[in-house]
Amino acid sequence: MRSLIFKDKNKLLPTYIPNSLPHRGKQLNQLKLLFFDSLEKPSEKFLKIAQLIGVTGSGKTCTAILFTKEFEKEALKKKLRIKSVYLNLRLLGTSKVVLYRTMVLKAAPEIFSQNLSALEMLNELINYLKKKKTYLIAVFDEIDYFVNYSREKLVYELTRLSELSPGEPLNFLGEIFIARSKKFHEKLEPAELSTLGRNYIRFQSYNHKQLKDILLLRVNESFKPGVVSEDLVEFISDLCSKPPINGDARAALDLLLYAGTLAEAQGFRKIMPEHVRSVFKEKSYLITTDEILNLPFQEKVVLLSVARALQRKEEPYVPYNKIKEVYKVVCEELKQRKRKEIDEQLQNLADKGLIEIKGLTKIGVSGVETAELNAFLNGLIMKINKVMETVI
Ligand SMILES: Nc1ncnc2c1ncn2[C@@H]1O[C@H](COP(=O)(O)OP(=O)(O)OP(=O)(O)O)[C@@H](O)[C@H]1O
Ligand SMILES: [Mg+2]
């Protein structure tokens, strides 16, 4: 059935990178100033490093990705062979080998081998780039996560690539590290800090006016004309520029997406302030689409099963075996093979703070009052379904 509300819902998801980013022109220019020079006589250039620092939802990831696209375009204009890779260290986990393998798979799949050690792989990549006269720029997103949770010395190696072949320029032209704050520096050794350098590009949280500009642009791309009024955008920007959202653009876009979904479900042709208010006051709103999108598929299925089991019982905790019953039904609906055990998924969801395991057998959601439970679960289920429907 054709939607009366949405033109293209995907344009509201965090996976979509818009072609222009209001209020991030300055940061984009800083990146250009630093890295574009490497494209003049690139074979004589050494590795350059930038650190993007800013709070959640301030546009670090999308700015970095948009920049690498522009960097590629600029390189192509100069008839250079160029590759860019984006790596999210939180999603890849805390193993250096896994990270380097992924980097090689993206930048030079021809030389990928399971048998090489981490350092050998890095060496192979550098040699390959040189041999093929290809240049590389890489984004290491959520470096603070890796540094906090891994014992491996990643920053040391990545920032000292030139020491693999001393005195010679590298075809690895640039590295962009992204973190929420500079706190991760406390865990680095002086030798790492010194090669990481001081090219900081800061991202402040968005204010009311900035959020409004961002939302207006995305509204045009994702909603049918007349569905979202300027007053409504004003209202959302107002809500999201204050605590607890504090200018997080991701949360503002989520609010728009779910208010639209609610309006659609109720047969409206326009989103009303009531729809926004209703989504905003649910606690499940604080679990972002991104968080759910980033869950491995099996964890999404198990989270959906927990939410539906709780909804059925109308209680904040249910026994493990009830969840397994619902899980079976969910797998059948999704035409997925049922797993014998779901303990690992439940534990992972608990580690991420999405569910709570009480005692040995009771599972539920934390911090939600019984009176709010139904609205919370409805919101959560709607979110998981939406993510599954758009991504699968
Ligand atoms: N200036 C902007 N214009 C349009 N959309 C934006 C802008 N800034 C952020 N967004 C959107 O907001 C969402 C969050 O942005 P992004 O993922 O870049 O934030 P982040 O700073 O990397 O956050 P985190 O630290 O949580 O990873 C994305 O969907 C992105 O497309
Ligand atoms: Mg990010």
Image: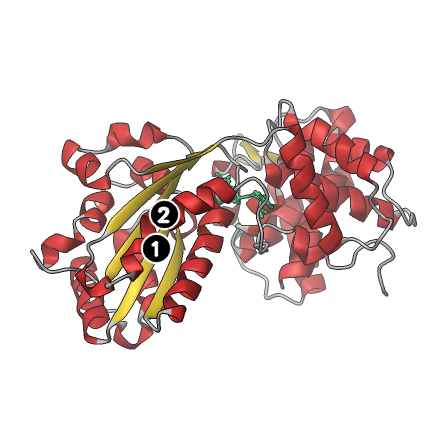
Picture residue at 59% right of the left edge, 43% below the top: 22
Front residue (pair 162, 5): 162
Q: Give percent across and percent down for residue 342.
A: 53, 51
* Three-letter amino acid code at the position of disc 2: Leu
Residue 33 badge: 2
Is 274 left or right of 159, judged from the image as shown? right
Which of 254/115 is in front?
254
In the rendered image, which quarter is residue 111 located in? bottom left
Tell me the number on the disc at residue 36. Answer: 1
Instruction: Judge the density around disc 1: few (<14), some (14-19), many (≥20) Cα neighbours within 10 Å.
Output: some
Determine whether label 2 and label 1 are within 8 Å by CB. Answer: yes
Provide the secondary structure element on which disc 2 rests. helix
Where residue 354 sits in the image (x, y, percent)?
A: 57, 37
Q: Is residue 52 visible?
A: yes
* Residue 314 visible, this orientation: no
User: Of all residues shown, which one is farthest toward the left?
Assistant: 166
Q: Please report the residue visible at 51 percent of the width from the left and 54 percent of the height from the top.
A: 296
Q: Is residue 148 above or below residue 48?
A: above
Which amino acid, mark 1? Phe
